């Protein structure tokens, strides 16, 4: 179960979906590795940030009401709150419907529960 809500009061500003986030506990560190002329490598590590996390979920046979609510949230709010099993995040999101499957993508901007 995932829940998407607005930060401002809006009676229509939420949707609860019977979907699970793929890889809810994943992440990676910022940085780069560059090959050097001597056959070695130069590496640069700038640490970990919650804002580098991306989440996705699929929703099979979403209801028309759920799709309308997702479209509403996307059209009127540039940032929303995503609550799921691994935490609560400020996110930007997108979604697409292909046949009977909706694919949702979320880009974490900040973690809200720590």
Image (cartoon, rainbow, N blue to C red):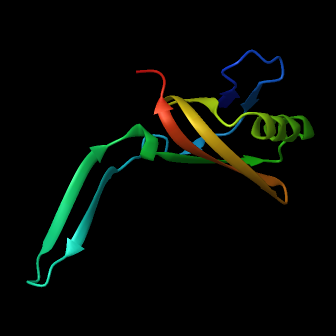
Residue at the (91%, 40%) spot, across then down: 64
Could you say where residue 27 lies in the image, as x and y percent from the top left? 39, 47
Relative side of 38 to 95, left or right:
left
Q: Check the image and report above or below for 10 versus 44.
A: above
Extreme residue toward the right, this view: 64
Could you say where residue 35 lies in the image, as x and y percent from the top left? 20, 77
Residue at the (32%, 52%) spot, across then down: 30
Residue at the (58%, 42%) spot, across then down: 21
Residue at the (68%, 37%) spot, across then down: 78
> Which quarter shows the N terminus?
top right
Relative side of 87 to 44, left or right:
right
Q: Check the image and report above or below for 88 versus 23.
A: above
Work out whether residue 56 can be spotted: yes
- Which is more toward the observer, 34 or 27? 34
Relative side of 51 to 64, left or right:
left
Could you say where residue 33 lies in the image, as x and y percent from the top left? 24, 67
Work out whether residue 86 can be spotted: no
> Which quarter shows the C terminus?
top left
Total numbered labels: 0
- Which is more toward the observer, 66 or 9? 9
Could you say where residue 18 lies in the image, as x and y percent from the top left? 72, 35
């Amino acid at each position: 179960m995932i829940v998407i809500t607005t930060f401002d009061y809006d009676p229509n500003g939420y949707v609860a979906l019977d979907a699970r986030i793929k890889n809810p506990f994943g992440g990676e560190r910022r940085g780069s590795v560059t090959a050097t002329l001597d056959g070695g490598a130069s590496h640069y590590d700038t640490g970990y940030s919650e804002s580098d996390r991306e989440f996705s979920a699929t929703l099979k046979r979403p209801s028309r009401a759920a799709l309308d609510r997702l479209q509403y949230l996307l059209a009127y709010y540039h940032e929303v709150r995503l609550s799921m099993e691994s935490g609560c995040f400020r996110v930007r999101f997108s979604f697409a419907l292909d046949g009977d499957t909706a694919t949702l993508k979320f880009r974490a901007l900040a973690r809200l529960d720590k």
